[in-house]
Amino acid sequence: MKKTVKAAITGWPVAHSRSPLVQGYWLKKHGIDGEYGRCAVEPETADEFYRNFKNSGLSGGNVTVPHKEVAAKACDWLDEAAQAMGAVNTLWLDDDGKLCGANTDGIGFLGNLDQMAPGWDDNPCRAIVLGAGGASRAVIWSLLSRGFQEVHIFNRTAEKARDLVAQFGPKTFAHSWDKVEDFLGTADILVNTTSLGMTGKPPLEIDISSLPKTALVTDAIYVPLKTDLLRKAEAQGNRTVDGLGMLLHQAVPGFARWFGVRPEVDDELRALVLADLGQEG
Ligand code: ATR
C-alpha cells in the first residue's frame, strides 16, 4: 500500500502559521491523500531535530522562525537561493534519505509580482528596498535574478544594509534611512520589507510623491492587506501589489515537491487566508 505523505510546518512557535490552511486547501482541491500539520520544535532541540529529520516521520516540511538558519546547516544539499541566504524554509528527503533544503521566499516575491503585475520587470533598472532583514535578503536576491542594475537598500541600522552589499556585490548600494526620498525620483520599483506599517507597529513615514508614475510599489506586509504605503501609492497613480501573494507563492514549491502537483494561487485561496486573518480583500 502506498504510504500517506506527511509534511508539516516546523518552527517555534507554529500555532499561528497559515501554512496548514494553505497546504490543506491544495490537498483538498487536488484530492490528494496527504497530510500537512504543525510540528513545534523547541529551540534547544532544533539542531538535533533537523539533523535527524529522517526519523521524524515527516517526508518534508516548511521551516519558520527562528529555525531557518539551523535547518539550513543540517541540510545535505541546498538550492542556490538557500545557499545565498544561509536559510531554508522548505525541506524534503531525497530517495537516499538525504535532507534537502530550499529557500522559496524569493520565488514567493517573484511569483506574486508576475501574477499581479505582469511585465513589472520588463525594464529592470533601479530598485529601492526598505529594510535589511531576512525578507530584504530574499527580495534583493530576487531583483538581481531578474536583472536589476541597481538595488538601493535603506535601513535604520546602516551596518545591516552594508552587510547585504558585501554579500550581494557591486549592483547593490547601502544608504542611511534619511536619504530614501532623494532616490525615489528615478526608481522603477519600491519594496517595503520593514515591519513599519504593519498592524501594531509604527507607521512608515516617507514622502513618496517624487516616485515616477510608472514605478511599482509593493509591500511584504499583509496585515493590513492595504498598508498606508500602498494606499498613498495607489492614490497618486502608481501600480501596487500587496504582500499576501508572497506568502502564498512561497508555499507552491513545497507542495509540488511533497505531493507531486504544482498548485495554483487562486482567488479562492486568497479569500480563505484573508478571512482567517480577519480581513477582507
Ligand atoms: P524580516 O525577517 O521579516 O525581514 P527582521 O529580520 O526582523 O524581519 O527585519 C525587520 C526590518 O524592519 C529590519 O530592516 C528593521 O530595521 P533594523 O535592521 O534597523 O532593525 C526594520 N524595522 C523594524 N522596526 C523598525 C523601526 N521602528 N524603524 C525602522 N526600521 C524598522
Image: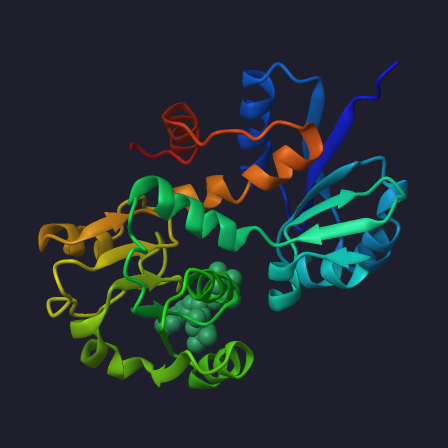
- Pick the residue in front: 234 or 147: 147
Residue 203 visible, this angle: no
Answer with the quarter of the image where residue 55 lies.
Answer: top right
Q: Is residue 118 visible?
A: yes
Of the four image quadrants, the one with ligand 1 is: bottom left
Residue 176 placement: quadrant: bottom left
Is residue 249 placed above or below 24 in the rendered structure?
below
**Image label count:** 0
The residue closer to the viewer here, 90 or 206, is: 90
| Side (left or right) of 86 relative to 141 | right
Q: Which quadrant, please, contains the C terminus? A: top left
Give the colour scheme shown.
rainbow
The residue shown at (72%, 34%) is 7
Classify residue 24 as left or right of residue 41: left
Residue 42 in percent (x, y) is at: 76, 53
Residue 167 drawn at (x, y percent): 55, 79
Would residue 83 appear left or right of 134 to someone viewing this image? right
Residue 6: quadrant of the picture: top right
Q: Tell which of 173 and 247 is nearer to you.
A: 173
Q: Of 31 and 68, which appears nearest the observer?
A: 31
Q: Position of residue 248 (x, y in %)?
A: 47, 39
**From the image, which quarter does the N terminus lie in?**
top right
- Residue 219 spot, x, y in % from top left: 33, 55
At 70% from the left and 37% from the top, the residue drawn is: 8
